[in-house]
């Protein structure tokens, strides 16, 4: 039995290794092809600008000569020709396919590599970040436990100072006390009690006042959240929902933030299954953010 188990491990590792080798070769070939394409585009652009400079130099010589040698009446008669030559000069400076000069980093996107990387990171994580919710940001619809770990929703607004600039005064949102600005960060949220919640990350500039739609998490450009409403699961950003198909509702949702790599990933801690991932070049530190509209969620 031990030999059979050992053989199974070896076979599976060899299979994974072979798959990684094939994927590595495929991606390296795509990088090489994209590099050659970008280089060819640059060479084409160089030829264009060399010809453009030659045309402009000839045009400058023509205009200087005309202005120097013609009297006022001659310049008036040549007005149309000068205008046409000027139009030609403006056309010469039109860029030619400038967007194609950049190396397209999307060529190295690989679902296999991404899932292997994410699974490896999740398996190697020994724990999650110690996150506390900032009470000053708390919506009047939410209450916070003494350990600042559990958010509970109430349909009735609490009597709080809603004028504080940090506070969400309408939607049932709350921010963590500290942002993340580098490295890999992960945290878990217990959601078993709630059928209506959002969790993810946001900039400090996320709208906090009023009942407008942009104050809802995921309905503005400053927040990225995983959302549940009853039996519907979605990823939300900038008002663009993306459905997430799940067989059953997770008891916990894990969030993995790769700040430098520009990715936020949502996963099921029990199975390490990736629920959804989104790539984003974060321009500033991001805060863990939460919303609850039914019962409670806990860090």
Image (cartoon, rainbow, N blue to C red):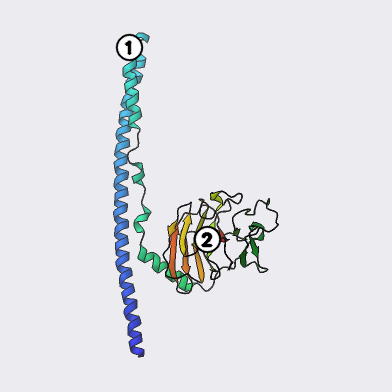
Q: Position of residue 293 (x, y in %)?
A: 57, 61
| In front of the other: 283 or 237 | 237
Q: Position of residue 47 (x, y in %)?
A: 29, 38
| In front of the other: 158 or 183 | 158
- Which SS class for mark 1? helix
Q: Position of residue 45 (x, y in %)?
A: 31, 40
Q: Quadrant of the N terminus?
A: bottom left
> Do we see residue 195 in this rendering?
yes
Q: Which residue is mark 2?
A: 200
Circles 2 and 1, Cβ within 8 Å, touching? The answer is no
Q: Which residue is mark 1?
A: 77
Q: Residue at x 35, y 37 (%)?
A: 95
- Which SS class for mark 2? strand
Above or below: residue 186 compared with residue 76: below
Q: Residue at x 66, y 51 (%)?
A: 165
Q: Residue at x 53, y 59 (%)?
A: 201
Residue neighbourhood size for the residue with mark 2, other residues' Cα within 10 Å, grouped as few (<14), some (14–19), many (≥20): many
> Do we see residue 262 in this rendering?
no
Q: Real-space Cα distance between discs 2 and 1?
A: 70 Å
Q: Quadrant of the C terminus?
A: bottom right
Identify the mark at residue 10; answer none if there is no mark. none
Residue extending farthest to the front is 156
Residue 50 figure quarter: top left
| In front of the other: 228 or 49 | 228
Q: Position of residue 30 (x, y in %)?
A: 30, 57
Task: Tell me which numbered mark, 2 or 1, is placed earlier along the sequence.
Answer: 1
């Amino acid at each position: 039995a031990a030999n059979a188990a050992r053989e199974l491990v070896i076979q599976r590792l060899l299979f994974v290794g072979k798959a990684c080798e094939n994927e590595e070769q495929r991606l390296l070939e795509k990088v090489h092809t994209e590099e050659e394409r970008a280089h060819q585009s640059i060479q084409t652009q160089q030829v264009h600008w060399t010809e453009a400079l030659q045309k402009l130099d000839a045009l400058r010589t023509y205009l200087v000569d005309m202005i120097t040698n013609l009297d006022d009446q001659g310049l008036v008669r040549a007005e149309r020709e000068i205008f046409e030559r000027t139009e030609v000069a403006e056309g010469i400076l039109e860029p030619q396919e400038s967007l194609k000069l950049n190396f397209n980093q999307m060529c190295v996107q690989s679902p296999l590599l991404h899932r292997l990387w994410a699974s490896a990171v999740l398996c190697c994580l020994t724990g999650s970040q110690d996150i506390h919710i900032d009470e000053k940001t708390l919506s009047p619809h939410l209450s916070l436990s003494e350990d600042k770990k559990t958010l509970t929703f109430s349909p009735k607004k609490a009597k709080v100072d809603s004028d504080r600039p940090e506070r969400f005064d309408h939607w049932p949102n709350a921010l963590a006390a500290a942002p993340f600005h580098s490295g890999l960060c992960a945290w878990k949220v217990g959601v078993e009690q709630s059928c209506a919640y959002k969790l993810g990350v946001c900039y400090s500039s996320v709208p906090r006042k009023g009942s407008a739609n942009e104050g809802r998490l995921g309905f503005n450009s400053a927040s990225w959240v995983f959302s549940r409403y009853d039996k519907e699961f979605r990823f939300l950003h900038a008002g663009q929902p993306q459905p997430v198909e799940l067989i059953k509702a997770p008891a916990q949702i894990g969030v993995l933030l790769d700040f430098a790599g520009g990715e936020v990933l949502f996963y099921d801690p029990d199975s390490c299954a990736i629920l959804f991932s989104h790539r984003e070049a974060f321009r500033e530190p991001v805060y863990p953010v939460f919303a609850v509209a039914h019962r409670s969620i806990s860090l």
